[in-house]
Image: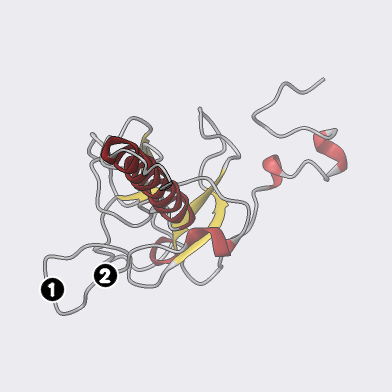
Amino acid sequence: MSAKQPSPSRHLLTALVRVSFLGALLLALASLGSMACEDNGIGRPCDIGADAGQSQAVYNNQALECPSRICLKPVNQGSPTLDTGPYCSATCSKDSDCDGQKRDNAERSDLRCKTGFACGVAFVVGPLCCQKLCLCKDFLGTTGLQTPQTCDVKLPENHGKTACQELP
């Protein structure tokens, strides 16, 4: 007596299940890999949607070209001939959160940040008040980056709140 052979359709069904499982597994691995290398767009050129002089800080919190939607042009505390343009930023808690695109010096029309980024407060009023953002060091000058006193909750005169929060 001979053993009963499985029908060809059963082999086909088993193969399809294996291929489907393998495809789902590869898709899951690809999506996990893309999350680990997220491009937050820091340093990309963007449009602030307004004219601003060297001594005026402006932002656009609806910039579609920025993944965070935050486009900045901080106050220029550095060189009077600064040619760095507005750039995409993102919220941060430390400098290492601010790895971003920098200028290609071989390209004259490139107005991206020359010196890299640091995490700090750019505004002490408005919707971005006391919020830490990735800031281009080109704008910071020689004094570096310091948290404004009005944003320091540890100072006794601030009563544990920032200038952005209601004081008692």
Q: Position of residue 73 (x, y in %)?
A: 35, 48
Toward which corner of the image does residue 144 lie, by quadrant?
A: bottom right
Q: Position of residue 82 (x, y in %)?
A: 28, 65
Toward which corner of the image does residue 101 lie, by quadrant?
A: bottom left
Does residue 122 appear left or right of residue 78 in this picture?
right
Which residue appears at 51% of the width and 28% of the height?
126
Render colour scheme: secondary structure
Q: Is residue 17 placed above or below 62 in the rendered structure? A: below
Does residue 61 appear left or right of residue 121 in this picture?
left
Q: Nearer the viewer, residue 143 or 37?
A: 37
Query: Which residue matches tag 1?
Result: 107
Assess whether mark 1 and mark 2 are in contact (beta carbons under 8 angstroms): yes
The residue most toward the bottom is 106
Which residue appears at 35% of the width and 52% of the height?
41
The residue most toward the front is 1
Which residue appears at 65% of the width and 52% of the height?
147
Q: Give the distance between the C-alpha atoms of the residues marked 2 and 1, in whole angstroms.
A: 8 Å
Q: Nearer the viewer, residue 34 or 160?
A: 34
Quadrant location, the C terminus: top right
Q: Position of residue 95 (x, y in %)?
A: 57, 63
Disc marking residue 98: none
Circle 1: element type: loop
Q: Is residue 142 placed above or below 162 in the rendered structure? A: below
Q: Nearer the viewer, residue 158 or 114?
A: 114
Circle 2: element type: loop
Query: Which residue matches tag 2?
Result: 103
Q: Identify the amino acid type marked 1.
A: Glu
Mark 2: few/some/many CA within 10 Å (<14, 14-19, 20+)? some
Q: Position of residue 90 (x, y in %)?
A: 46, 46
Which residue appears at 58% of the width and 40% of the height?
131
Q: Identify the amino acid type marked 2.
A: Arg
